[in-house]
Every structure is written in C-alpha cells, then in structure tokens.
Image: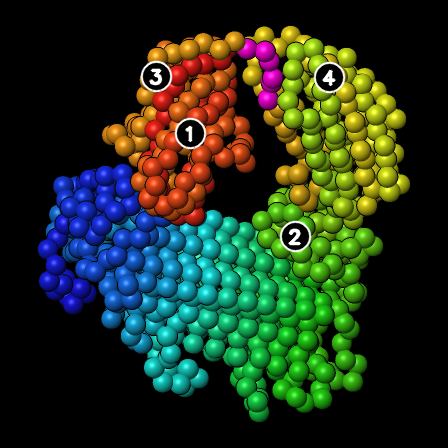
Amino acid sequence: MLAALAWGVPPVHAGGIVGTGTPGSCTEAALDAALAGGGTVTFACGGGPVVIPITSTKILSKSTTIDGTGQQVTLDGGGTTKMFLTTYQLSSGLTLVFRQLTLRNARASDQGAAIELVWQEPTRLTQLVVEDVTFRNNVAAISHADWGGGAIYGVTGVFTIRRSTFVGNRGANGGAIGTIAVQITIEDSRFEDNATLPVVGDPFNGGLGGHGGAIYIDGTNLGALTLRRTVFSGNRATNLGGAIHSWMYGLPSAFVIEDCTFANNAGTTNGGAIFHMNGRLTVSGTTFSGNTVVGQGGALWEGEADAGQTPVSIFNSTFSGNSATGLRPNSGSTGLGGAIRDNGNPTTLSHVTIAGNHADWVGGGIVGGSRATLRASILADNTAANGGNPWDIQRNCSTTLADGGFNLQWPTLNPSDSNDRRCAAGVTFAAPQLGALADNGGPTATAAPLAGSPAIDAVTSGCPPPATDQRGYARPYGLRCDAGAVEWRQSADLAVTLSSGPAAAEGQAISWTIGVTNAGPFAANGALVTDDFPSTVSGVTWTCVPAGGASCPASGSGDIAASVNLPAGGSLAIEALGTVSGLGGIRQLTDTVTVAVPAGMDDPHPADNSASLTIPVERTMSFYTLSPCRLVDTRKAAGSRGGPALAAGVARTFPIAGACLVPSTAWAVSLNVTVTQPTAMGNIRLFPGGTPSSLTSSLNYAAGATRANNAIAALGSAGDLTVLANQASGSVHLILDVNGYFE
C-alpha cells in the first residue's frame, strides 16, 4: 500500500467530456483534462470504436464515474501501464463507477493492473461499481504470496459488478480479481481464460501464491461474496481454486452462489473450480462440469480451520464430468473427490445430481462428508481408479453420509470388498436414466431424468421445499417430487415463424404464412395456435396443412385460435388471406402469432413461442415542394439533428416531421443526402423510424470522400427517419437537405 501511495502522479478529480464528437478528439490528454473537477466523465468520440492509449496512471482521490454509454471506448495500457489507482482518504469514502468501457493490456509490477483500490478506514470504505465493462489481457506481473488481481485489486471496500466480462487476465492470486476484506456482488457476468502466475515454490509442498484462477478472496470483512447468473469457464490456477479461491474469517462471512456455471476450470492442488474455507457456503441452481484438479475436489473443495465456521448447503445443483486426476504413484493424498472434497464441515446436499465424475484414488462423486447429510439426490456412474489398484471400490462415495432419505446410487457395491461404501445408509441402488448434460430450460445446463427414470416421484415426503428445481420449474410435477436437481416434466420444444408479402395497400389482398414446429421430445397434443389479425384486415380465411403426423383444423375464418396436435418432429403450415381496408393514417400493420404447449407441459425454450411481423403500408400520395432546407448536419453541435458524426454500424434516428415545414402528416420526404469526412469506405442506408434496417444503399462513398445523391425516404409513424452508416469502422458526417414531401 505504501508503494501505491508514493506514485509520482498528481491527483485528479473527475468531471467532464472526453472528445468533441470525432474519434481523433478522444485522447489521453482529453481524458486527463476531463478528470478534473469532480463528477462524471463521459465521451463524445463519434460513436464508433475508439482506442485511447493510457501511458500514465490516473490517481483518483474523489468520487468518479467514467461512463462510456453510447460510445465504443477502449482504454489500452499498451502492456506497460497501470490505469487507475486510488489514494488513502482522510475525510470521506470514494464511490467509483466504471460503465460501458473496455480496459485492456494494462500492466502492473504489483497488483491491480487496470484498477487498484488501496486500503481505507472502515468508516470510509471505497464503493466500486462496474457495469457492462470488458477487462481483457490485464497483467499483475509479479508472483507473490498475497498480491494479484490482474484486472482489479482492492483492500477493503464494497464491490458491485454487473454484466461484465473478464478475459485473459493474469495475476499472482486472482487472475482477474484479487481482494482483501472486500464484500463483493457479481451478477450476470463472465470470467474466461483468466489464470494465476506460477507458484513461488512447489504447490504440493508449501508453495506460495497461484490461488484463484479468476477470483482470489482473502476475507470479506465478515460480509459476503455473492455470485448470481455468472459463468466461469476455462480459468486456471497454479495452486488452489481453478476459478475461485475463498478464504474467509468465520461466521457471519458467507459465500453465496446462485444460478452459475463453472465449466472446464482447472486447479492444481485443491478445488478444480472452487476452494473455500471458513465461512458459510450456499450453492443453488448451479452446474459444475468438466472442471479438473490434480489434488482434491475436481469441482469443489470446502473445509474449515475453525470448527463450525463453514456450514455448507448445496441444493438444486449438478456436478457432471469433473475429475481429480491425482499423481502416480498415488499414495492416497491426491486424486480425491472427482466432484466434491468435503473436509468434515456440517454439510447438507439436497436435490443434487452428481453423475459421471472421476477420481484417480477414491470418491468419484464425494470424498469425506463425516458431518454431511444427503437427501433426495443422485450419485450415479462416477468412477474411481483406486490409484491403479484393482480394488474397484468407492466409485461414488468414500464415506457413508447421514441419510436424509430418497437417494439413488448406481452402480451397486463391489460384493467382494467390504471397503466399498453406500453414499447413505438407505440409498436405493438403481440406474437413474439421466439424459446428457444439456439446455433443458433455465439458466444452466442440467442432466434431466428420462421418462421411466426411478428418480421420478421418488421423494414421498418433505418436498417442497425446495419449491422449484434447478431450472426454476415448480416442484412437484405430479403427486411427488423427483430425486436429483431436475423435476421431470413432459416437455415439447415448440416454435413458430411468420412471414408476409412486402407491403399492404388499401383495398388489396394481403397474405400471411405461419409455420409451427415441435422439436420434441414429447408430443404436444392440444397445443394452441393463436393469431389476432390487424383490425384493418377483413374477410380473413385460412388453411392448415399438417406434416410429420401432426393434425389441425383444415380451414377457418377470422382470427386463429386453433387446437392442434404436434408429435415430436411434426409441423404445420398455415396460410391466411384477407383484404386491407380502413387504413386511414396508419403507416404499418403489425401481426403476432403464438403457440402454447398444452396445460401441464413445459417448453424449454419459450422465447420462440411467438413471432411478430411489421408490414409497411403502400398508398397513393401527392408531392409538395419545399424550399431547400437543411434537416440534419452532424458537423454541428450535439443535438437531435446535429452531432456527433454517425458511428460505423450504429443506427441513428432523426426527428423529421415538424422541421423545415415538413408536416406531421408527411409519409415520405425528398432529400439531398451528403456525406463528408468518412474514415472508411461504406454506404448510407435510410429507413423509416421504428422499422428494421434496410439493405438498400442510398449513397456509396470512399474513405475521405465527400459525396451526394438524391433520395426519397419513407418516414416512421412518429415522423422520424433512421440512418445507418454501413462501414467497417470509424465514423462519417451526414448532411440531409429536404426539398419536398409526400402525403
């Protein structure tokens, strides 16, 4: 910390705008100037991708918000520079907000290459908020027992991280984030390919550092580390905790994991995904798959240094394909617990599926658990190599856990060796008939029981709770709950599509084509297809043609509300025809079709159960001339019809009606379209506000050229026009002059 305070850079206080509307105006000098005066820093860089090289560390001593909303700003440390560093506060705490930015290639010789927050007094803790930020390839470059956090490092404080991505960061401890005494909440984020630096010494013989491939936690100030709906994938630790190392200091400290995914992370000594000590651990709705460790706990290692300080609750979660690979020759100290290594904490496992994991020694599913209770769970098809010995024992569990009832285990015990273990005294030996790990609905992948599985309706009492399964679907389905993480339900993956002709015109026929499919696995007999056609379409008749064993009413009239039968693989093609009338001032027609599974069934992917289509209206119009008048000029100051320049690939909508004597009743305008100062070759596309982007170019141009063309552009229902600069990168200025309108 003292070294951090000694940086020879003057403090700055935030408040200002970086840039004047062009990419070239967004420089490090402009950022330095904006970081003065207290408040919020925003960017006006033209909206296209902009990289600002950072060559000196920015010292933050007052509350600061750095907000890249609406821009595409990257701060790049060039592989040499720590970006942001706080100072010790003598009066009040700091609140720092980073929003919609990319922070990449920062480098520190100690910790926190992109952001480092130094220690503060308990009464003035730093509040860090990170929203929609990408941290990429930041490096805290020294191997050390405590330092790390390739992207972020903090000592004391409260961190909130939402919708952010950490990729390819490196640090001694915590490839992405390293903290001491910090309370952290992380939601809807992603950690990929982060890693620790090499251990100082031998990781199996007291080596220092190398903990937490993505996150390193050294206490939470008796608060919580909370993870929700976050993915940890491909992170690596050279010591403990392939994704996360969490060492807390007893209750009420807590580690809460909800609806997360840990996939293909790798630890070395203990905890392929997570190493946790000394604080309450609660895991729900979470899947661990493909994680590995050499030592113990292919997915999870949990223990306590002080008795009673690490109560563990794991429910509605899945462990699949994790492994503890061991060191050969194996004496029994490595290769323990393919899924879980429990070190005698008070632990409850309820409605957990542990299947297809492997240990080189014993306990392909669970090792330990002397104070653990197993309830309504599945341990199946886990394997243990017994260090290469021919014993064939303890494939699922190394210890018989306390029996909470309604558990399934498979395969049966080795009848020739009494050292084999039941996972619970009253366990039922039966193959659970699980499907492969897959998207079965909900936020995480699951291994759902197949029809006929003995896990179905196996829990005869005491459920609910839990009120839902891992996917969030209600328990029970039927009379009783199922064992394992997933409540079996009949499901059908229905989907609907909608297409129509190119335009609608008064007094003319209009048609729609509706497609309905069932991807299974079950038949959906009694599914409901509905379509309430626009009120300006009359005399609607429709026909339905089934395929693949499906059935539906052959024809009908008016709105559709049809009960149909769709076997797995079945489909329907519905053709509807009507006449457009009574359009008045309507500019477009919108139609929506839906399909719903029968009552009592689920659709694992409900997002494709509806489809909508907007159809433009054609009509005969008169043209009215106007004296040439400038509608839009992005070279001017920022405004609704002014700057900034159009950013590459970003659509911008301009209000047209009401300007330059264009009336609100205008349907289209006659324009002269001019571009200037384009940074790359491209074209301009014009289309009505509120409608999908056009594929038709109104003007093509080369980099650096000034070009003009005439165009007739239809307006949206709000009298607005959307413009897209279709170019690979950078920006272009747009000028629109109107000379007439249609109504």
In space, the residues marked 1 and 2 are separated at their CA atoms by 50 Å
Q: Nearer the viewer, mark 1 or mark 2?
A: 1
- Looking at the image, which is closer to me, 295 or 343? 295
Q: Residue at x 37, y 40 (%)?
A: 647
Q: Secondary structure at mark 4?
A: strand
**Are circles 1 and 4 on residues that touch, CB within 8 Å?**
no
Residue 415 shows in this picture: yes
Decide if residue 285 is on the left or right side of residue 478: left
Determine crowd level at label 1: few under 14, some 14-19, many 20+ residues with C-alpha closer than 10 A: few
In space, the residues marked 2 and 3 are separated at their CA atoms by 58 Å
Q: Is residue 234 magenta?
A: no
Question: What amino acid type should be assigned to the residue bearing mark 4?
Answer: Ala
In space, the residues marked 1 and 4 are separated at their CA atoms by 35 Å
Q: Which residue is mark 4?
A: 509
Q: Earlier in the sequence, mark 1 or mark 2?
A: 2
Q: Nearer the viewer, mark 2 or mark 4?
A: 4
Q: Residue at x 34, y 59 (%)?
A: 104
- The residue range painted magenta reads 616-621
Q: Which residue is mark 1?
A: 709
Q: Position of residue 367 (x, y in %)?
A: 59, 74
Q: Which residue is mark 2?
A: 439
Q: Residue at x 34, y 41 (%)?
A: 705
Q: Earlier in the sequence, mark 2 or mark 3?
A: 2
- Looking at the image, which is closer to me, 457 or 207? 207
Q: Nearer the viewer, mark 2 or mark 3?
A: 3
Question: What amino acid type should be assigned to the residue bearing mark 1?
Answer: Asn
Q: Position of residue 110 (x, y in %)?
A: 25, 70
**Are circles 3 and 1 on residues that touch, CB within 8 Å?**
no
